[in-house]
Image: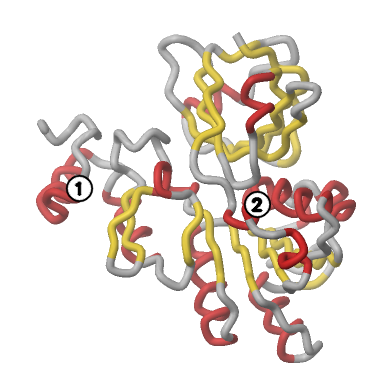
């Protein structure tokens, strides 16, 4: 069992938990995720790692209520425990394997949207711990659902916050801030990392392609099973078929077909849609969703 050491509501339908998981914490790297199960019969829920302390054996997760399982999970409290807490899974962010001195020469900007702030945080924290200052843009629909502001402020070189409705800081999207930094403030970036809703990442990539900034995105929003078995996170990356949970979750954003990913995500939710995807995708569909009879 994996004990919950802290359970906190960050915003409407958004929760943070510190979980005692020494073996997982010991091997965590930015960009990876874990899978939790509340009990033996519970749904497997893949969640990106928000933070980790290898010495204390603690892993921090942030999740948003999107269905029955996460609704039930939101009612768990300090002292409760998860039946399973598996990880770390997925590939770590590529920069953790780069030469630190070379990485220090790069100008990097992170763009976080909504709950995407949680997986961006450990990456920015890792940069800070290695003496690398990065710019961070955090966008939210309004002030009430803005999360981890103080934590991000402590590790970001420069933090820019924007809200869709203008209820806090500046009004606008993350793309508006990035465009302003580059076009009006003379900022030059060698790399952009964008994590958030699919539609947000799509428009960040459209802008960075126009600006000539290589961009990495995390496709964790489309993961369901997290092990490569269900096939839910199948996506087109350039001329290749990839699965976010086993090949990613991070990919070259300029090669990801976001329109296909968003359409497929909607189709996958119904039995009829999964059957149609099997027909359309053939051998690349992946037969582990339980509806393919493979």
Q: Quadrant of residue 255?
A: bottom left
Please tell me which residue lies in front, 68 or 233: 233
| Residue drawn at 52 percent across, 24 percent down | 86
Please tell me which residue lies in front, 200 or 1: 1
| Residue drawn at 55 percent across, 27 percent down | 71
- In screen coordinates, is 255 left or right of 138? left
- In screen coordinates, is 13 left or right of 280? right
Residue topped by disc 1: 285
With respect to residue 108, does 242 lie above or below? above
Residue topped by disc 2: 96
Labels 2 and 1: the sequence-earlier one: 2
Please tell me which residue lies in front, 150 or 155: 155
With respect to residue 37, does 157 lie above or below? below
Q: Secondary structure at mark 1?
A: loop
Q: Quadrant of residue 227?
A: top left
- In screen coordinates, is 233 left or right of 275? right
Question: Label 2 neighbourhood size at 10 Å, few (<14), some (14-19), many (20+)?
Answer: some
């Amino acid at each position: 069992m994996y004990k919950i050491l802290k359970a906190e509501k960050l915003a409407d339908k958004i929760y943070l938990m510190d979980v005692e998981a020494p073996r997982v914490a010991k091997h965590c790297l930015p960009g990876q995720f874990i899978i939790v199960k509340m009990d033996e019969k519970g749904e497997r829920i893949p969640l990106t790692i928000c933070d980790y302390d290898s010495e204390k054996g603690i892993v921090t997760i942030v999740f948003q209520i999107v269905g029955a399982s996460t609704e039930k999970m939101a009612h768990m409290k300090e002292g409760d425990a998860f039946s399973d807490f598996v990880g770390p899974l997925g590939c770590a962010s590529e920069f953790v394997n780069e030469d630190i001195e070379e990485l220090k020469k790069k100008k990097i900007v992170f763009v976080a949207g909504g709950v995407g702030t949680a997986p961006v945080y450990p990456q920015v924290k890792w940069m800070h711990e290695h003496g690398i200052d990065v710019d961070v843009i955090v966008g939210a629909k309004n002030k009430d659902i803005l999360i981890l502001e103080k934590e991000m402020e402590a590790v970001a070189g420069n933090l820019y916050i924007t809200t869709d409705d203008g209820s806090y800081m500046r009004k606008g999207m993350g793309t508006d801030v990035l465009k302003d930094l580059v076009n009006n403030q003379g900022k030059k970036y060698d790399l952009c990392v964008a994590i958030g809703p699919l539609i947000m990442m799509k428009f960040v990539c459209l802008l960075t392609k126009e600006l000539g900034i290589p961009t990495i995105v995390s496709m964790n929003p489309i993961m369901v099973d997290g092990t490569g078995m269900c096939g839910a996170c199948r996506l087109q990356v350039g001329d290749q078929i990839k699965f976010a949970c086993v090949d990613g979750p991070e990919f070259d954003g300029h090669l990801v077909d976001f329109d296909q990913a968003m359409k497929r995500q909607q189709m996958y939710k119904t039995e009829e849609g999964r059957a149609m995807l099997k027909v359309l995708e053939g051998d690349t569909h992946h037969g582990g969703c339980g509806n393919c009879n493979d």
